[in-house]
Image (spheres, coloured by chain):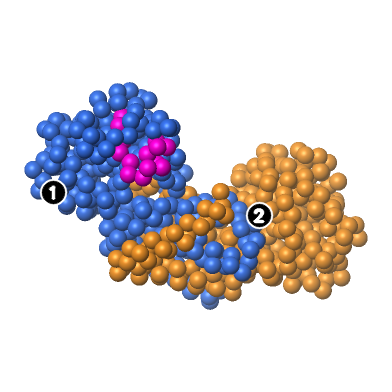
Chain colours: A blue, B orange
């Protein structure tokens, strides 16, 4: 089995590593437009060979589209125009509704499997790729009833090799859910970084004081705009809805602190503490 | 040297462990009002003995006040009323202006050293205490010119044993800085938890999707209200100021996403990415 990975960043690169190490793929080829990243991916041995886009489509049994979602939306249909009957195309993007809409009526729709492996770090590029990234995490399969059962089964086996737990939902539900458990946390981290960086203009030593709690809360602010700009615009409506709920909660805190309302602050914190029962 | 720790939670308990293990104290006694915590602290060996408040003051060379800051503000003056000339009282609270104001004119002010060891986790109680918690972190000494040089030196040595880096600033500057690098991150985590918990009422499986990024951003929402209610009210003015800057940044994001302004979103993210240069 040859796997072709288009986009050798954190996700594409990490998949390439484990699919070959764990024997799912005999050969992994990759496509990477950025010449520095391409050369690094080859040097580090993420893939057997960096090839061009058409060659990748030509020689791969499974083609993994692991580029930012704005690009992926255009690319998936183009790849499906070019594949033969037994090839499979998958995407690994973080928003799913637009990409699924884009190929909804494609004559080879059944050869497409739309997935979101829910794993990652705040780092990007082939240097960020790592073995074991996906182990134990959830992988969401979207609109899987539109994929052929055989193509779906192959991709389920592939994610099985990556030790991912499969979950199934439609693309639209996916985008609602990820707005809550992923997109909003990125925005809150970005805003937190901006707030403290603003202050740093006057107070050079402010970061001397930052302890583990701050670093943990702000770490997603290191995330790459190439990935995040299209996520936030493609999932605009859901993100705005969650953002507005979040701003309401912030304003409840603001108002309770403003009026020294200790009972109200305590109630809000106790309610937030319920997260303990849900997340380790 | 006998060290008495009043409040055997995360901070007090962790100090007790390392001050004895590392030989700074021959004996550590503790005061803990909650009977379950008191019994646990003794069983786990955090302290040699749990004693009552007056006994702790009577037999300790250094008295560490490690209770929530609302209680500490009242307690420190009372302890200073009761100590003999060579005893030292320190606090380890997260806000410093009110506690320093409270004892500003106390006749034994010079025996008081006001410190904030910048370490912790989102857990609380004696069960959360751990060796090595303070290693490599910053410890802030506030208004240290009001402490006697000898008392200050003893406490500097004590934090040296805990491997902390000393920083010196006045209480008012401390409270501004910590509003930025600690208090605001707690509020953003609480609000994030509340937002997602709200949604969970309809969508039972929403947390199945949470990946590492979400957990990291929300983990401070597990923090204890007994600690955080007084911090947020005592540091009200600074917290509100930072909160308002933060809400401005969130609204910039909101408006850029609302209007599909990709350039603006990219600029905000790139600016936030500068945090990479500052935090590992």
Please name whichever residue, B189 or A38, is drawn nearer the observer in this view of the structure. Answer: A38
Can the viewer see residue B188 in this picture? Answer: no
> Where on the picture, by quarter, is residue A147?
top left
In-image side of A137 versus B131 (left or right): left
Q: Residue at point 54% right, 63% down?
A: A197
In-image side of B131 versus A104 (left or right): right
Magenta part of the chain: A28-41
Same-chain check, marks 2 and 1: no
Furthest-left residue in this view: A107
In-image side of B276 versus B136 (left or right): left
For disc 2, the marked residue is B118
**Could you tell me residue A227's position as x and y percent?**
35, 52
Please name whichever residue, B141 or B272, is drawn nearer the observer in this view of the structure. Answer: B272
- Chain containing mark 2: B
Please name whichever residue, A132 or B98, is drawn nearer the observer in this view of the structure. Answer: A132
Q: Tell me, yes or no, whether the highlighted magenta stretch contains residue A29.
A: yes
- Check the image and report above or below for A93 versus B188: above
- Check the image and report above or below for A27 versus B91: above
- Chain containing mark 1: A
Q: Residue at point 30% right, 32% down?
A: A29
- Check the image and report above or below for B114 versus A132: below
**Could you tell me residue A139's position as x and y percent?**
31, 40
What is the distance, in whole Å, between disc 2 and disc 1 at their CAs?
Answer: 54 Å
For disc 1, the marked residue is A104
Q: Residue at point 87% right, 70% down?
A: B107
- Mark 1 is surrounded, within 10 Å at the Cα level, by few (under 14), some (14 to 19) or many (20 or more) other residues, namely some
Q: Residue at point 64% right, 49% down?
A: B10
**Could you tell me residue A34's position as x and y percent?**
36, 45
**Could you tell me residue A50's position as x and y percent?**
32, 34
Q: Nearer the viewer, mark 2 or mark 1?
A: 1
């Amino acid at each position: 089995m040859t796997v072709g990975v288009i986009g050798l960043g954190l996700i594409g690169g990490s998949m390439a590593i484990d699919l070959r190490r764990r024997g799912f793929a005999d050969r992994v080829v990759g496509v990477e437009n950025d010449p520095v990243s391409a050369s690094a991916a080859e040097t580090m041995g993420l893939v057997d060979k960096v090839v061009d886009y058409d060659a990748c489509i030509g020689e791969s049994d499974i083609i993994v589209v692991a580029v930012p979602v704005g690009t992926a939306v255009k690319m998936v249909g183009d790849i499906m125009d070019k594949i033969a009957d037994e090839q499979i195309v998958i995407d690994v993007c973080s928003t799913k509704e637009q990409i699924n809409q884009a190929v909804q009526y494609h004559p080879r729709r059944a050869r497409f499997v739309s997935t979101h492996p829910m794993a990652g770090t705040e780092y990007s590029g082939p240097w960020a790729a790592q073995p074991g990234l996906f182990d134990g995490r959830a992988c969401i399969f979207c609109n899987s009833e539109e994929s052929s059962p055989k193509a779906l089964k192959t991709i389920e086996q592939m994610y099985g090799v990556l030790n991912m737990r499969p979950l199934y939902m439609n693309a639209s539900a996916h985008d609602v859910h990820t707005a809550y458990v992923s997109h909003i946390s990125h925005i809150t981290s970005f805003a937190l970084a901006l707030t403290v960086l603003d202050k740093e203009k006057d107070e050079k030593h402010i970061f001397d004081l930052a302890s583990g709690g701050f670093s943990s809360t702000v770490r997603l602010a290191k995330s790459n705009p190439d990935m995040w700009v299209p996520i936030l615009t493609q999932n605009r409506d859901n993100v705005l809805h969650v953002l507005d709920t979040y701003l309401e909660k912030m304003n409840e805190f603001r108002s309770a602190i403003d009026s020294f309302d200790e009972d109200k602050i305590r109630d809000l914190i106790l309610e937030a503490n319920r997260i303990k029962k849900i997340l380790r």
